[in-house]
Each structure stands twice: as structure tokens, then as C-alpha cells.
Image (tube, grey):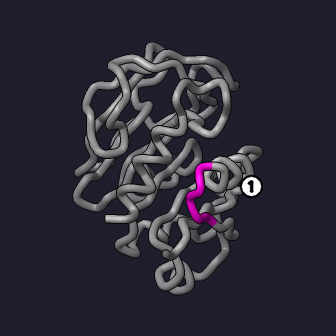
């Protein structure tokens, strides 16, 4: 089975995403965000756009959204997805990392198995301000209006929080669900 590619957008948790997947026996490989899209399209079954400091350092990661593969964007990965599809990202009012209670508004294949409220660990230095056309709002919190969004038709999913860190309750569910999506 082909691996899931974890795109390194220079974030501090990208290696933890990779390790979490491997600990779950999910075949995964880390790639640079400069990897040519043609190489990505032929060699993996799904893409996780990891976090990072700024959109300006995201390389060609936005081009991976057009390959027809399932894509999960985490933090900066969500922002890459939103801006590439016509949404906007602004500075968040809350800033740095911390615990947040997220309200699940709509269940879908990525959030299956979660209760209506979950406790997560997230950075809100930047946030999606406007969801792109064709995307559904899946989750929000008291400090962020877009904690999760998805385009089910394109199989593009984005979350503001970090499921790979131990402070996030049941973060592995996201990866289990995304692995299942990539196997379908």
C-alpha cells in the first residue's frame, strides 16, 4: 500500500505527526514542501499538510490540493487550503498555543467518532476568517469561528488544532479516519 505523505511546512510538530502515524502502523513518509506535485501524485494515497510559521514558507504545498488525493490540513495546512481555494486567513485574537474546547457542528468522515465537544491543543496566531466556497464549517470554538472545515466532494479537510500532541483528547481519531478516507 502506498504511504500517506506528511508535508513538512517547517512546523515544530511535523515530525510528531509522522511519528504518530507510524506508531499507529499507518505507512507514512515526510516530504519537503518543494516536492514536485507529479512526484506526490504518483507515490502516495493521501497528503497531510503539516503546520509551519507562515504561508510564505509553504512552497508548492497548495498545488497538492489539485491532485485528486485526499488532503488533511493541520494548522498552517488549513490556512494553505483556505487561501488556495479562495478563503481568507487573518491574525487570531488569542495568539499562541493553548487548550481550547471545540464544538463539533457537523459530523463527517473525518470527525466520525467524536462527541459534540472535544478538548484540543491549538495555535490561534492565524485563523481562517472566511471559508472558501464549497466548504462546510465542521467545528468552531469560543475563540475561533473556523476550527474545522471540509470539502467532501474534493476530499479536502482542514483543522486548526493539532491532533498529534498528547494534550488533544483522542487526536488519533483524526488520523484513523483520514487513513480510512485514503484507503477508500
Bounds of the magenta segment: 24-28
On screen, residue 84 above or below 14: below
Residue closest to the far front: 25
Give whichever of 113, 154 is nearer the camera.
Answer: 113
In the image, taking residue 106 as reference, residue 87 lies left or right, namely: right
Residue 26 painted magenta:
yes
| Residue at 37 percent of width and 28 percent of height | 114
Q: Estimate how packed mark 1 is, as few (under 14), some (14 to 19) or many (20 or more) residues with alpha carbons within 10 Å.
A: some
Residue 179 shows in this picture: yes
Q: Quadrant of the C terminus?
A: bottom left
Residue 53 shows in this picture: no
| Residue at 40 percent of width and 31 percent of height | 146
- Residue 69 x/y as whole percent: 39, 69
Determine which quarter of the picture holds residue 122: top right
On screen, residue 30 above or below 138: below
- Residue 91 x/y as whole percent: 58, 32
Q: Main secondary structure of the magenta part?
A: loop
| Residue at 54 percent of width and 57 percent of height | 48
Q: According to the image, label 1 marks what residue?
A: 10
| Residue at 37 percent of width and 19 percent of height | 103
In the image, taking residue 84 as reference, residue 51 lies left or right, namely: right
Give whichever of 111, 139 is nearer the camera.
Answer: 111
Amino acid at each position: 500500500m502506498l504511504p500517506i505523505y506528511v508535508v513538512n511546512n517547517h512546523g515544530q510538530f511535523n515530525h510528531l505527526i509522522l511519528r504518530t502515524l507510524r506508531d499507529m502502523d499507518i505507512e507514512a513518509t515526510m516530504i519537503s514542501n518543494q516536492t514536485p506535485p507529479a512526484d506526490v501524485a504518483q507515490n502516495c494515497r493521501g497528503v497531510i499538510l503539516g503546520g509551519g510559521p507562515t504561508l510564505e514558507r509553504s512552497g508548492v504545498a497548495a498545488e497538492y490540493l489539485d491532485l485528486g488525493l485526499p488532503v488533511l490540513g493541520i494548522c498552517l495546512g488549513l490556512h494553505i487550503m483556505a487561501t488556495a481555494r479562495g478563503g481568507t486567513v487573518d491574525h487570531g485574537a488569542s495568539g499562541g498555543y493553548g487548550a481550547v474546547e471545540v464544538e463539533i457542528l457537523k459530523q463527517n468522515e473525518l470527525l466520525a467518532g467524536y462527541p459534540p465537544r472535544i478538548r484540543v491543543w491549538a495555535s490561534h496566531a492565524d485563523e481562517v476568517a472566511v471559508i472558501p466556497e464549497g466548504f462546510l464549517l465542521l467545528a468552531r470554538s469560543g475563540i475561533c469561528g473556523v476550527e474545522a472545515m471540509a470539502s467532501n466532494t474534493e476530499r479536502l479537510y482542514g483543522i486548526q488544532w493539532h491532533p498529534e500532541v498528547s494534550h488533544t483528547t483522542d487526536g488519533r481519531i483524526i488520523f484513523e479516519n483520514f487513513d480510512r478516507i485514503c484507503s477508500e
